[in-house]
């Protein structure tokens, strides 16, 4: 691996792509985390680039740790979201240099992954949600879906009174027993209320209860995990490896859900994967939109020993996420019989649309 001489970013408010160039002219593409990506790209250039330009990248993990140490006055999510753009571009470059896909670099093989259709919607009636998911099942072959409970960080409030109690049995009745059902509370509940909802989920055969309590309250989540038979899951928001060590040490959840770009890239996510593997915990990462975070997760899941049962796959199209339009030259997210295929092309195996790049906010840092 050679020294990086240039870091370029192309972004809007919602998504930001990163291109790195080394001293021999090799290039790699990555992405910072979605949402406020224009802020994150500024952090990439101001707080990441000064520590990584012109530095050996053979030990990527050590280099990423160096960035967090040098920026110790500014810890937290935005720094990790920016680091993720650099990390994922490094992996693409390595794959292209070695003529291997990233999943092969990680020890896996290109192939297919089972997916679950992940709904982002709360402002939808249970009846309409059930009808929508049945249509998607018939069209794409999904045999697992995730829906939403409560109100996001809702302090025990529902999106409207009674919606949670209605949607849980409605979904089971509408989709039948052959479909896996997952649900996400997005930090809504106190432990007592989460356990109450969890019992209803168990009665209706749900298999996955995500982020039932405020995600930063690990002990609250553990109370719910210990009280229920359903798998309690979480971790998407957590970007600090010391917090991850505690989550896993106390087994606050049954399934860990790091987000590759919230956490800071593939290298840091693989450290969480390793911790979870030693503790006997499966990994089902968070990837709730069709930016490159889902592609990164595909490559990772196909390579790790403790992969969960499926890939999260957002079923929200451009009506819900208009910014997802016109990102790629070729769609990397085609679903067939509920499965998605990881390409054997070098690196991430994608190309960003030139027109999108030309209309983005451009910044560059170089030696």
Image (cartoon, grey):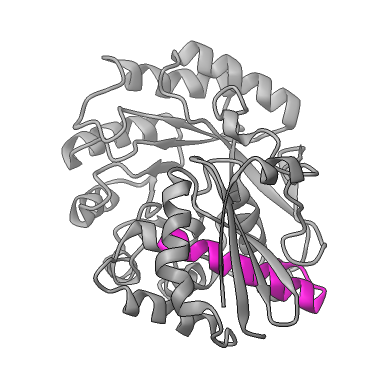
x, y percent for residue 172: 50, 24
x, y percent for residue 192: 17, 38
Task: Residue at 19%, 56% (x, y): give it.
Answer: 219
Identify which residue, 361 or 124, lies in the foreground.
361
Identify which residue, 332 or 327, lies in the foreground.
327
Quarter the C terminus occupies: bottom right
Q: Is residue 205 magenta?
A: no
Q: Is residue 269 above or below residue 36?
A: below
Q: Is residue 234 above or below residue 59?
A: above
x, y percent for residue 139: 74, 25
* The image quarter in which residue 337 lies: top right
Identify which residue, 136 or 99, lies in the foreground.
99
Identify which residue, 215 or 92, lies in the foreground.
92
* The image quarter in which residue 154 lies: top left
Q: Is residue 325 above or below residue 345?
A: above
Task: Residue at 19%, 50% (x, y): give it.
Answer: 220
Task: Residue at 68%, 78% (x, y): give it.
Answer: 22
State which region is magenta: 80-103
Which residue occupies the extreme front position in the image?
Answer: 367
271 with respect to 185 (left or right): right
How many numbered discs? 0
Q: Predominant secondary structure in magenta?
A: helix
């Amino acid at each position: 691996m050679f020294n990086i001489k240039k870091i370029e970013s192309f972004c809007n408010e919602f998504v930001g792509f990163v291109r790195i160039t080394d001293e021999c002219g090799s290039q790699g593409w990555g992405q910072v985390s979605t949402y406020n990506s224009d802020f994150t790209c500024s952090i990439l250039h101001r707080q990441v680039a000064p520590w990584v330009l012109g530095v050996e990248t053979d030990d990527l993990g050590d280099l990423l740790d160096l960035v967090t140490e040098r920026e110790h006055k500014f810890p937290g999510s935005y720094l990790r979201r920016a680091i993720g753009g650099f990390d994922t571009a490094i992996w693409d470059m390595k794959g292209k240099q070695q003529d291997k896909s990233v999943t092969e670099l990680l020890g896996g093989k290109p192939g297919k992954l089972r997916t679950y259709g992940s709904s982002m919607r709360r402002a939808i009636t249970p009846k309409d949600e059930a009808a929508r998911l049945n249509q998607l099942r018939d069209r794409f072959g999904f045999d697992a879906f995730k829906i939403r409970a409560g109100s996001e960080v809702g302090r025990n409030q529902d999106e409207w009174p009674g919606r949670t109690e209605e949607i849980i049995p409605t979904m089971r009745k509408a989709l039948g027993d052959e479909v896996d059902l997952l649900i996400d509370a997005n930090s809504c509940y106190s432990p007592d209320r989460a356990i109450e909802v969890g019992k209803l989920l168990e009665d209706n055969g749900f298999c996955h209860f995500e982020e039932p309590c405020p995600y930063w309250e690990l002990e609250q989540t553990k109370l719910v995990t210990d009280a229920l038979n359903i798998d309690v899951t979480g971790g998407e928001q957590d970007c600090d490896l010391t917090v991850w060590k505690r989550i896993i040490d106390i087994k606050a959840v049954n399934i860990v859900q790091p987000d590759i770009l919230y956490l800071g890239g593939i290298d840091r996510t693989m450290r969480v994967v390793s911790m979870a593997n030693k503790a006997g915990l499966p990994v089902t990462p968070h990837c709730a939109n069709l930016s490159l975070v889902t592609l990164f997760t595909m490559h990772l899941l196909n390579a790790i020993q403790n992969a969960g049962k499926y890939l999260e796959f957002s079923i929200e199209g451009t009506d819900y996420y208009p910014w997802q339009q016109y990102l790629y030259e070729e769609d990397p997210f085609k679903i067939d019989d509920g499965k998605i295929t990881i390409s054997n092309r070098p690196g991430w195996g994608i190309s960003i649309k030139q027109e999108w790049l030309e209309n983005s906010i451009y910044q560059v840092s170089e030696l």
